[in-house]
Image (spheres, coloured by chain):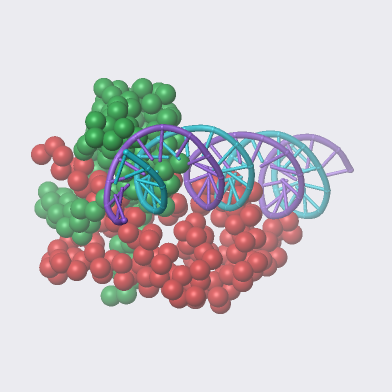
Chain colours: A red, B green, C purple, D cyan
Amino acid sequence: MPGDEWSTATAVLRLGSKLVDGIQQGVAAAGFPDVRPVHGFAFVRLSEAPATTAQLAQHLGITKQATSEIAQYLVDRGYLTRVPDPTDRRARLLVLTDRGRSCTRAAQAAASRTVHSWEQDLTDGQKAALRDGLVAAAGSGRLRPAW
Amino acid sequence: MPGDEWSTATAVLRLGSKLVDGIQQGVAAAGFPDVRPVHGFAFVRLSEAPATTAQLAQHLGITKQATSEIAQYLVDRGYLTRVPDPTDRRARLLVLTDRGRSCTRAAQAAASRTVHSWEQDLTDGQKAALRDGLVAAAGSGRLRPAW
DNA sequence: CTAAATAGACAGGCGAGTTGACTACATGGT
DNA sequence: ACCATGTAGTCAACTCGCCTGTCTATTTAG
């Protein structure tokens, strides 16, 4: 049935938009009003393991110059620190501070609330099918800003 | 199970990213290399019904000045025309040209292909559950750029 | 020990969006 | 009929996020 894929596609975009808005709003309400969506993607990467500026740039899909500016912004506001890389004296690793980890937790909590709000009118079976389907369809590639 | 919502959330973002990339690529391959994602959102709105610049601005969530520039860009490239609003001599309605409609169809076809590519490894039951769940969760609000 | 590659930062530019100011037309109250 | 206020659309100047180009310090390969 043609048109069905289109409503599926627009649904994904609507959910993505709601999710980003929900995270942004929840994070701001939790006392972190100065972080933007792109910072969230950086936090997700750095919460897995520290990274150099160049590695983070690769992950985000932007230049290392832009990444350098973003990192400085987050260091200035206490979300990140730079620590010397023990294996390379040119490099400095970007590491989340306590504040950075708190912010990441707030973002995940807001995302969780938003996902639940989607599921308001769904049966338990629909919820499980939706989550499984989404995860199966999306795979596990890197997570970066949409465009 | 905590963490489940988070993987659901990131799955939505990944799918959204893939969808936008797929549409962009498909539309460019179909001979429309000069349209950006925001233009697609404008096309979707205008394919429902003509709109004034101010109405389109409201829909896209940006200022009417920015919308005016986008509209001029699309008029210059033959995707839109401006026609006088019969009910208000200040206003001019933005209308899709044949080229604009062709581009919209190409975008929908590309979106369709991308949705199918997600469903590659899903059973028919999973596909139906995923589509139904997405559409039910997303509702039918306005469609606008994610951020 | 030198040559090429890489990490990171500085400078300047571009593009998409913003706020502010303005003209033309519309609309409601007197 | 008139004037005050509001709305459609555009021009100008600015901001901001990201880009390209260039540079130094350090690493790594030959």
User: Is B14 placed above or below D23 here?
Assistant: below
Who's the residue at 26% across and 22% down the image?
A: B98
Who's the residue at 51% across and 47% down the image?
A: A61
- Which residue is at the front of the view, C7 or A5? A5
Who's the residue at 29% across and 28% down the image?
A: B84
In screen coordinates, is A38 left or right of A146? right
Provide residue B66's location: percent of width, then percent of height.
45, 41
In screen coordinates, is C10 left or right of A7? right
- Which residue is at the front of the view, A19 or D11? D11
- Which residue is at the front of the view, B120 or A71? A71
Q: Is residue A142 visible?
A: no
Provide residue B80's location: percent of width, then percent of height.
33, 27
Q: Is residue A62 visible?
A: yes
Q: Quadrant of residue B100?
A: top left
Count all numbered tags in the image, as a single digit.
Answer: 0
User: Is A56 placed above or below B83 here?
Assistant: below
Who's the residue at 32% across and 59% down the image?
A: A18
Provide residue D6's location: percent of width, then percent of height.
36, 51
In screen coordinates, is A54 left or right of B94? right
In screen coordinates, is A116 left or right of D4? left
Quadrant assignment for the N terminus of chain B: bottom left
Provide residue B35's location: percent of width, then percent of height.
40, 32
User: Is B111 placed above or below B2 here?
Assistant: above
- Which residue is at the front of the view, D5 or B30? D5
